[in-house]
Image (cartoon, rainbow, N blue to C red):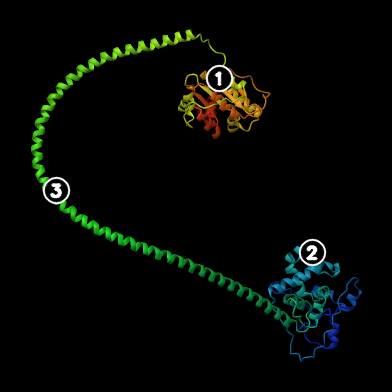
């Protein structure tokens, strides 16, 4: 079906013969869409529309358009002298302008290449989401300047809109239709009364915006009312608190007044006593003067006796020095006697130097024969976390250092493998044993002896807990096996281990103290 240009109020009314000749090739509009530049040059559109639109579009293959009713021939109006002035295009609301550009951009790639104006051929190649955004100025200018291009776009848009497009061509707007969509179709198709449709759409858009503003104002008013109600509730609570505080202050004020009356009464009594004390003071001053004279006489007598006492003290010091020399001789003789007695006792008991120590017996047995701990063993325990305490304890004679192996290695160098951890700790403990000469035992968790251990340094004993036993239990058995009175130092950051060995008289220390000692070696 050949396309015909819809009614345009801006066109000058001509006689039927001229109107039929100029269909599809009339002069382009001079005013663009609001927000887009107007293009006064319409020669491109005019050259493309030299042939009648009906003949040209009928010969184009693939172009289908809905039935567009032929506009009624308006009654000719008397022309004013001079050239006719086209009516300016209406100011389009921003949503309507965006919808017109979106509709045009959507159908633009569907036009044949020779029907797309030169300025829009590059825009037609854009992606769908960029076409309406980046090509909006060029599309709006071409819609205003090229009526034939607008007719082609209108035909394809109306074909997509169906009944709504037909209703707009008839100059009516369905009540349920989107006013923005109706205004966009009316601008493109331009049926009779299209300006009124655009104005009605603008009024609807403005009314919707005003409704949104009113709704926002109502929401803000409700929020303010809610806040005001909350503030009133808070104020009531604060008022109740202030009333309670006022009652309490009044009660305290009454108490203060009573205390003030009592203080005034006490002050008057104190002043009376002060007057009596002043009188007594005058009496006592006289007595003191007499006593001072007596004291001076006594002081002179005391000084004489002091001189005599100093001479006697000198003689006593000399006598005490002689007595001290005698006591030193007696003490030396006593210690010599004790030493000789110890040598005789060792010879009498025939005690040979031992090759095994109590910890060696613990390492060879699994039985726990702890029994009841003697009351005197707890007295040797000391609770301290001072790292310097380790050096003091290792300086004690015949000290035994017991180390919770993995507790120390995982705290000091946990980034290494277990084999490297054991090797590093045992090597460091060998240095401590060589420096102090003390007995050193390191305990590791393990059901059987590990492989890959370095040679055990002299003075260091390496033990592994057996199956069913933990290193903590083995450490406690080692502590219980030691005789009462021997200093035993246990290094572990496990609080349960520390508490257990402390009850048996050992000295618990944290792992950091040993790590710092190893770092210093």
Q: Which residue is mark 2?
A: 122
Classify residue 140 as left or right of residue 443. Answer: right
In the rendered image, the vertical position of residue 164 relative to residue 343, given as above or below: below
In the rendered image, the vertical position of residue 226 relative to residue 378, given as above or below: below
The residue closer to the viewer here, 327 or 193, is 327
Which one is earlier in the sequence, the residue at label 2 or at label 3?
2
What is the secondary structure assignment of the residue under circle 3? helix
**What percent of the width, then of the height, locates residue 222?**
56, 72
Dividing the picture into quarters, in which one does residue 303 lie?
top left
Callout 1: few (<14), some (14-19), or many (20+) C-alpha neighbours within 10 Å? few
Q: Which residue is mark 3?
A: 277
What is the secondary structure assignment of the residue under circle 2? helix
The residue closer to the viewer here, 367 or 127, is 367
Total numbered labels: 3
The residue closer to the viewer here, 211 or 141, is 211
Q: Residue at x 60, y 72 (%)?
A: 216
| Distance of label 2 from label 3 (alpha carbons) | 118 Å
Which quadrant is home to the N terminus?
bottom right
What label does residue 289 carry, if any?
none
Which one is earlier in the sequence, the residue at label 1 or at label 3?
3
Dividing the picture into quarters, in which one does residue 240 lie?
bottom left
**What percent of the width, then of the height, locates residue 81?**
74, 90
Q: Are marks 2 and 1 in contact (CB under 8 Å)?
A: no
Q: Which residue is mark 1?
A: 358
Q: Residue at x 13, y 27 (%)?
A: 302
What is the secondary structure assignment of the residue under circle 1? helix
Q: Are marks 1 and 3 in contact (CB under 8 Å)?
A: no
In the rendered image, the vertical position of residue 12 relative to residue 222, given as above or below: below
Q: Nearer the viewer, mark 2 or mark 3?
A: 3
């Amino acid at each position: 079906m050949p396309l015909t240009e819809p009614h345009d109020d801006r066109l000058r009314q001509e006689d039927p013969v001229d109107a039929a000749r100029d269909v599809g090739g009339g002069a382009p509009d001079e005013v663009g869409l609001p927000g887009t530049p107007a293009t006064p040059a319409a020669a491109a559109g005019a050259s493309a529309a030299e042939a009648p639109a009906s003949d040209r579009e009928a010969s184009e293959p693939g172009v289908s358009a809905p039935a567009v009713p032929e506009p009624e021939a308006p009654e000719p109006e008397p022309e004013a002298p001079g050239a006719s002035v086209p009516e300016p295009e209406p100011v389009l609301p921003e949503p309507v302008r965006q919808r017109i550009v979106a509709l045009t951009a959507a159908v633009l790639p569907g036009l044949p290449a020779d029907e797309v104006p030169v300025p829009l051929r590059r825009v037609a190649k854009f992606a769908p989401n960029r076409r309406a955004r980046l090509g909006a100025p060029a599309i709006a200018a071409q819609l205003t300047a090229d009526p034939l291009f607008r007719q082609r776009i209108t035909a394809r848009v109306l074909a997509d809109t169906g009944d709504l497009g037909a209703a707009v061509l008839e100059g009516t707007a369905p009540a349920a239709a989107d006013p923005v969509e109706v205004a966009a179709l009316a601008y493109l198709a331009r049926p009779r009364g299209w300006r009124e449709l655009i104005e009605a759409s603008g009024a609807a858009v403005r009314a919707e915006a005003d409704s949104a503003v009113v709704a926002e104002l109502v929401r803000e008013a409700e929020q303010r009312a809610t806040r005001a109600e909350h503030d009133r509730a808070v104020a009531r609570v604060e008022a109740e608190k202030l009333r309670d505080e006022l009652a309490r202050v009044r009660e305290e004020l009454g108490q203060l007044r009573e205390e003030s009356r009592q203080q005034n009464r006490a002050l008057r009594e104190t002043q009376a006593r002060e007057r009596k004390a002043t009188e007594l003071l005058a009496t006592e001053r006289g007595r003191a003067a007499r006593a001072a004279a007596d004291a001076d006489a006594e002081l002179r007598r005391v000084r004489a006796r002091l001189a005599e006492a100093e001479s006697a003290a000198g003689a006593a010091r000399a006598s005490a020095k002689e007595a001290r020399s005698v006591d030193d001789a007696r003490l030396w003789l006593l210690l010599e006697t004790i030493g000789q007695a110890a040598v005789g006792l060792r010879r009498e008991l025939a005690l040979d130097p031992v090759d095994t120590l109590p910890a060696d017996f613990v390492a060879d047995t699994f039985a726990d024969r702890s029994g009841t701990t003697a009351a005197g063993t707890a007295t040797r325990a000391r609770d301290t976390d001072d790292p310097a305490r380790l050096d003091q304890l290792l300086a004690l004679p015949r000290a035994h250092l017991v180390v919770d192996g993995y507790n120390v290695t995982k705290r000091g160098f946990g980034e290494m493998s277990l084999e490297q951890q054991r090797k590093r700790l045992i090597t460091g403990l060998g240095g401590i044993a060589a420096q102090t000469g003390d007995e050193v035992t390191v305990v590791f968790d393990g059901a059987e002896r590990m492989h890959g251990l370095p040679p055990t340094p002299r003075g260091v004993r390496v033990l592994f807990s057996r199956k069913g036993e933990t290193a903590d239990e083995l450490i406690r058995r080692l502590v219980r096996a030691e005789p009462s009175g021997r200093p035993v130092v246990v290094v572990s950051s496990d609080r349960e281990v520390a508490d257990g060995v402390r009850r048996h008289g050992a000295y618990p220390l944290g792992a950091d103290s040993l790590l710092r000692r190893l770092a210093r070696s």
